[in-house]
Image (cartoon, rainbow, N blue to C red):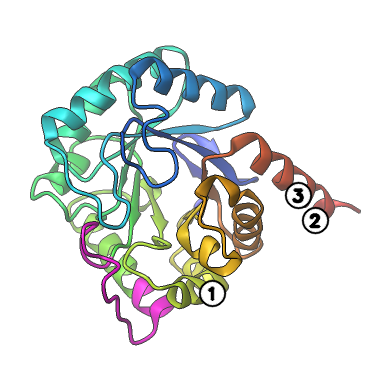
Amino acid sequence: MIKTFAGMTLDRPLMMGIVNATPDSFSDGGEAFAQDDAVARGLKMMGQGADIIDVGGESTRPGAAPVSIEEEIRRTVPVIKRLSEAGACVSIDTRHALVMEEALAAGAEIINDVTALTGDPRSMDVAAHTDAPIVMMHMQGQPGSMQKSPSYEDAPRDVFNYLQARVQACEAVGIARSRIALDPGIGFGKTVAHSLQILNQLDLYAQLGLPVVLGVSRKSFIGKIANEGDAHKRLAGSIAAALAGVARGVKILRVHDVAQTKQALDVWMAIKNAN
């Protein structure tokens, strides 16, 4: 098992704080659309203990419409530059090669791609010619239609096989395994049942020997289980799912609510490590 990611040790789970510089993300659309608001959110998350600030300029919520690459760059690059200058370890949440390049030039250190470097013909080449760590996620279909009729023979195993193949594709072009983390993509082309099956078997992905990233914060499967339509009222369920993931070997938690999740994680770790 790889012991570090992006220069950080994985002896405890890392916290990745979400900054959506978008008007239409599912749970916080518009809240950090203005650049000053996005920077302020990122700085606040750093103060709350976030290890990574994940900046995105295109919503990939179910049914989301794509934005132009130029607009995505306009939304993200100034935010990344300011956060990086403030000392943040920034990841760029994008599926577009040009955005990756511009973000890395502005100070981003990590590429976080919901398409696992398949969404743009140049993405693999861009990743291969940098030293940036990469988070590769599984998504069935495209954001605009991924939730219409997702289907799997065995969701946890199908996702495992896909991610394993993507790791092999990266190695074939010279991307070292030590640069890769994997995200099973909860809610991305998956029913509630699929997501729960994957969450229950997250320890399966440890077989690949790479850090697992988990994004469950405020997601719709929590709302459907708890009958809660307001994404802002899903904190308890988000923390429950995150801790279940950590118990199954997850090394990086991608969250909206850094302070609350960190408190829960700190208590969970203290209990686990008590002698």
Residue 220 magenta-highlighted? no
Quarter of the figure with residue 69: top left
The three-letter amino acid code for the residue at tag 2 is Lys
Q: Is residue 7 above or below residue 255?
A: above
Report how far apart the C-alphas of labels 1 and 3 lie in the structure: 20 Å
At numbered mark 1, what does the secondary structure look like: helix, strand or loop? loop
- Most frequent secondary structure within the magenta stretch: loop
Q: Position of residue 91 (x, y in %)?
A: 37, 34
At numbered mark 2, what does the secondary structure look like: helix, strand or loop? helix
Indicate which disc, 1 or 3, sits on the residue closer to the N terminus: 1
Q: Position of residue 213 (x, y in %)?
A: 47, 53
Q: Quick check: marks 2 and 1 in contact, CB under 8 Å?
A: no
Q: Is residue 106 above or below residue 272?
A: above
Residue pictured at 62% horizontal, 30% vertical = 49
Q: Considering depth in this image, is 83 or 256 the residue closer to the camera?
A: 256
Q: Considering depth in this image, is 193 or 55 the residue closer to the camera?
A: 193
Which residue is label 3 attached to? 269
Graded by Cα atoms within 10 Å as few (under 14), some (14 to 19) or many (20 or more), the crowding at tag 1 reads some
Q: Quick check: marks 2 and 3 in contact, CB under 8 Å?
A: yes
Residue pictured at 54% horizontal, 32% vertical = 51
Numbered tag placed on residue 117 in the rendering: none
Which residue is label 2 attached to? 272
Numbered tag placed on residue 201 in the rendering: 1
- 32 on left or right of 268: left
Q: Which residues are magenta?
A: 140-160
The three-letter amino acid code for the residue at tag 1 is Gln
